[in-house]
Amino acid sequence: MDTDALSNETYAAVFYTSDSYHHNLTLQFGLLASHFKNDDDYLEEAQKRIENWKADLNRSLNAIFFDTNKPSSASLLIILNEIENKINAVKEIPIKKRTFEFKI
């Protein structure tokens, strides 16, 4: 699945929010998209990834921000919680009511 196949709601919740924090975080969510066949699968896996990152913030900081100055673990936790809350809101929207930019 390409990120273009995600719903506008999913894209905004995950990509716009993560990119407002740091592009490296956005890249991690983009790489994840290639492994899933639909919006709901992607959202589930994004939540799992967030939970894994939150479980070990120091390791996550090193993995995500390997090529740049690392933000604080507190700020990473805040943005991960924000993205997770937005994902939960998208999951409340039935798939047929989500909007898609491209029909694939």
Image: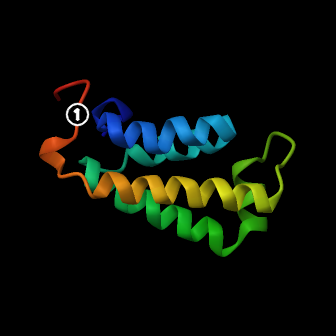
Q: Quadrant of the N terminus?
A: top left
Residue at x-position 23% and y-position 31%:
100
Residue at x-position 22% and y-position 33%:
99
Q: Residue 90, how many percent across, how many down?
A: 33, 51
Callout 1 amino acid? Thr
| Rendered image coloring scheme | rainbow
Q: Quadrant of the C terminus?
A: top left
Q: Residue 54, how many percent across, how many down?
A: 64, 69
Residue positioned most to the right: 69
Residue at x-position 17% and y-position 48%:
95
User: Up-down: is 52 above or below 94?
Assistant: below
The local secondary structure at tag 1 comes to: loop
Q: Is residue 54 left or right of residue 44?
A: right
Residue positioned most to the bottom: 55
Q: Nearer the viewer, residue 27 or 17?
A: 17
User: Up-down: is 21 above or below 59?
Assistant: above
Residue positioned most to the top: 102
Q: Quadrant of residue 97?
A: top left
Q: Which residue is mark 1?
A: 99
Q: Is residue 29 left or right of residue 42?
A: right
User: Up-down: is 103 above or below 44?
Assistant: above
Please tell me how crowded label 1 is: few (under 14), some (14-19), or many (20+) other residues with Cα within 10 Å.
Answer: few
Q: Residue 30, how many percent across, how many down?
A: 48, 40
* Total marks placed: 1
Q: Residue 81, how many percent across, how many down?
A: 58, 61
Q: Quadrant of residue 12?
A: top left
User: Up-down: is 66 above or below 15?
Assistant: below
Q: Nearer the viewer, residue 87 or 5?
A: 87
Q: Is residue 84 left or right of residue 36?
A: right
Residue at x-position 71% and y-position 56%:
76
Q: Quadrant of residue 60?
A: bottom right
Q: Nearer the viewer, residue 86 or 52?
A: 86
